[in-house]
Image: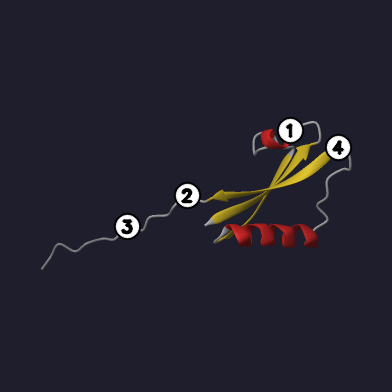
Amino acid sequence: MLKILVLICSASLDHAACDQTTAIDVVRAMEVSNPQQCGFMAQALLAQTSLAPEPGKQYLKIVCLRSPTRTASVASDSRQ
C-alpha cells in the first residue's frame, strides 16, 4: 500500500529538499495500492479542494510513501 502526502513547500526551498520535515504543511490523504493510483487520486483530491499554494511563495509536491507492511500473526493450536 502507498500513502498519499501533499506537501506545501516554500518557493525558496529546492524541490529535492522538500519533504515531511521541511514542508510548511503536510496533508495526509488516503492509501492506494499502486503508484498510478497515487498520482491519479492525489490529483483528484487537489481538484476537489481549495488547497492552493500562494503564487510565487509556495508550491505543492505530491509524495507517495510505501506504508509499513502489516504482518498477520497466525495462532497455531498445539492440541491434537
SS type, badge 4: loop
Does residue 66 lie above or below 12 as drawn? below
Task: Single out the residue that lies furthest toward the right.
Answer: 55
Query: Does the residue at mark 2 contact the one at mark 4 (Cβ under 8 Å)?
Result: no
Q: Nearer the viewer, residue 74 or 79?
A: 74
Q: Which label was assigned to residue 57?
A: 4
Percent coordinates x, y for residue 10 in the rendering: 79, 35
Q: Earlier in the sequence, mark 4 or mark 1?
A: 1
Three-letter residue code for mark 4 = Lys
Q: Residue at x 76, y 32 (%)?
A: 13
- Of circles 3 and 1, which is in front? 1
- How far apart marks 3 and 4 lie (CA) works out to 48 Å
Does residue 71 lie above or below 61 as drawn? below
- Name the residue that disc number 3 marks: 73
- Of circles 3 and 2, which is in front? 2
Q: Earlier in the sequence, mark 3 or mark 1?
A: 1
- Name the residue that disc number 1 marks: 14
- How far apart marks 1 and 2 lie (CA) works out to 27 Å
